[in-house]
Amino acid sequence: MGNFTKLLKLGVFLLSLFFIVDQVSAQTFPNGTQTLNCCDCTSNTCDLVADSDPAPFNTADLQGYILVDVNNSTVDGDADDDLIDAFSINGTFSGVPTGDYVIYYISYSPADAAFLAPYFAPGQPIGDLLGLGVFQGDATWTSSDPAFIVIGSDLATVNDPVACACGGPLSFGNHVWSDEDGDGVFDPEEDGIGGVTVILYNADGSVYATTVTDADGQYVFTDVPPGNYYLELDFGTLPNGSEVSPTVNDNDYGDNGQTAIFTVIGDETGTFDLDAGIVLPGPCVDFAVVANAICSSDKTSYQVLLLFQGGDTGSNGYNITDNNTGAVVQNVDANSITFGPFASPDMDGFSYTISVADHPECVQTVAVTDVNCVVTAVELLRFDGEATDNGNELSWTTASENEVDYFVLEYSKTGANFAEVGVVNAAGNSSTAKDYSYTHEMFDAGSHYYRLVEVTTEGTKVVVSDVVEVRRYTEDFAITNVYPIPSDDMVSIEFTSVENSEMTIEVIDITGKVIQQQVYDAGVGQNRIDIDVSNYAAGTYFFTITDGTNTLTDKFIRN
């Protein structure tokens, strides 16, 4: 009876959801009264009020509002982390700090309230909630199980320094100095560096102004209006091999020569103190040491390989001290040395100090504690999946096994909330490669996600694989691959077309805003579109491909 009731409830909600989606497609957001942008020049907080009537929802459903600190640089001062800040049932958020936000309106079935409540909690990524649904366009997501519909607002801002114009122009700057001891502290005996070009950028990356340090290393920008900016050093005006000091104490520049984005409001007193510490080239500037623990084939022992270079060694090479035993090897004229073997696991690990014989100030220590050549009971070489006529076939290979009882295949339709779908017995103990496979009898179109779990003879369960996605297709016009996910610079989208046609591709951020659009001439069969995402902020993005009649939707992730 319980299953029948659940199916009946789901059927009723699907009918109401059909009505809701039909209404959403026709409505223009917003409908009600709201305050998405506010200014308070004497305070760092404001009140935001959400749309009182974003769509004619079923009054039997529960409704609420979710305030999210979005990844956006329009207003600096907030975390920009795409995490939920607050949940409200009346749409009013009081004392919201300076920053940029999106308010999401959600209407959901009372039967799913307990399941959805954790997804509303402050500190949770909004992507976890949206990932349960399907993106419908126009900042709208829907789901039938759990049953909900979500609509996002336009960007909401608190104390936008440009729009609020709370103050006038400001002058600021300070020093570029030679950090002789490389500690990021501007010591009295350390001198400024003249002739260094400093560039002032708007937050969007466009150049606002440039200046050059004087003989004392001082620089200044005058009459800068309110806005969001960052500074950058021109390394071409510094000696080759120069490096930026650690971003601590007096140094405000990162190792890439840039400051963080800062806001000029205009009512500050004095000047911003933005110093840049520079470590000029010396005998240690290119001195580098790397240590590697190399395990034996049976995983019972390891050797330590030390690699070192640079430091103006002359003819006397390097000195190496084993800090665990006190043993010293002097005047090594090669760029590497090996110690060991040592038994694994090794709770003490290793520690070595390497110095340049002619320049003892050039010194580095490398150490690792608790060296264990067997990290898990299974050393996994690969875990793959593909769609076949028999279902979704998962296969994997282990390089070694240690007291493993069996493997569990876990499945998810969304990439979250995995459940067991199959069990495969393991070899138990092995030091040679073993191949395994399992076929999940799943034939639904769309994406399917799997991961592999090891279960030891003692009953310990450990996830040993990354998540594998298997795609199944039933239409001739379909997306066949999106890669790499996640991506740092380029995303490739492969799709099939039944005819030569002009396609429109749109990339949409998590707020529903179209951030890129392009037209592509598709041919019959397989096609590929490459999208440059190197300038995108980190996060989840959706895209659509349409031929004017049919539309495909999918998503990707920018690192």
Image (cartoon, rainbow, N blue to C red):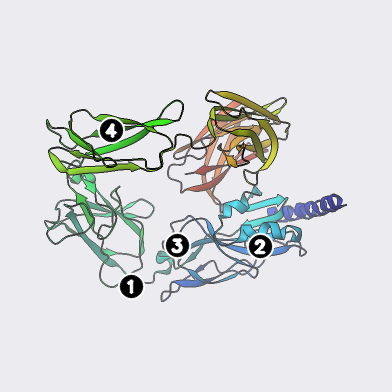
Q: Distance between the residues labelled 1 and 3?
A: 20 Å
Residue identified by numbered label 1: 267
At numbered mark 4, what does the secondary structure look like: helix, strand or loop? Answer: strand
Residue identified by numbered label 3: 78
Residue 183 sits in quarter: bottom left
Q: Is residue 397 left or right of residue 208?
A: right
Q: Please tell me which of labels 1 and 3 falls first in the chain.
A: 3
Q: Residues within 10 Å of mark 1 (few under 14, many from 20)?
A: some
Name the spot of residue 160 as percent of width and height, x first: 43, 65
Residue type at mark 2? Pro
Q: How far apart are marks 1 and 4 (CA)?
A: 53 Å
Q: How crowded is mark 3: few (under 14 residues within 10 Å), some or many (20 or more)?
A: some
Q: Distance between the residues labelled 2 and 3?
A: 26 Å
At numbered mark 1, what does the secondary structure look like: helix, strand or loop? Answer: loop
Residue 241 sits in quarter: top left
Q: Please tell me which of labels 1 and 4 falls first in the chain.
A: 1
Q: Do the residues labelled 4 and 2 touch (CB within 8 Å)?
A: no
Q: In this view, does 457 lie to the left or right of 211?
A: right
Q: Please tell me which of labels 2 and 3 falls first in the chain.
A: 2
Disc 2 or disc 3, which is closer to the eye? 3
Q: Is residue 238 left or right of residue 107?
A: left
Residue identified by numbered label 4: 307
Q: Please tell me which of labels 4 and 3 falls first in the chain.
A: 3
Residue 500 sits in quarter: top right
Name the spot of residue 334 as percent of width and height, x first: 21, 28
Give me the residue at 64% from left, 67% from top: 32
Disc 1 or disc 4, which is closer to the eye? 4
Residue identified by numbered label 2: 54
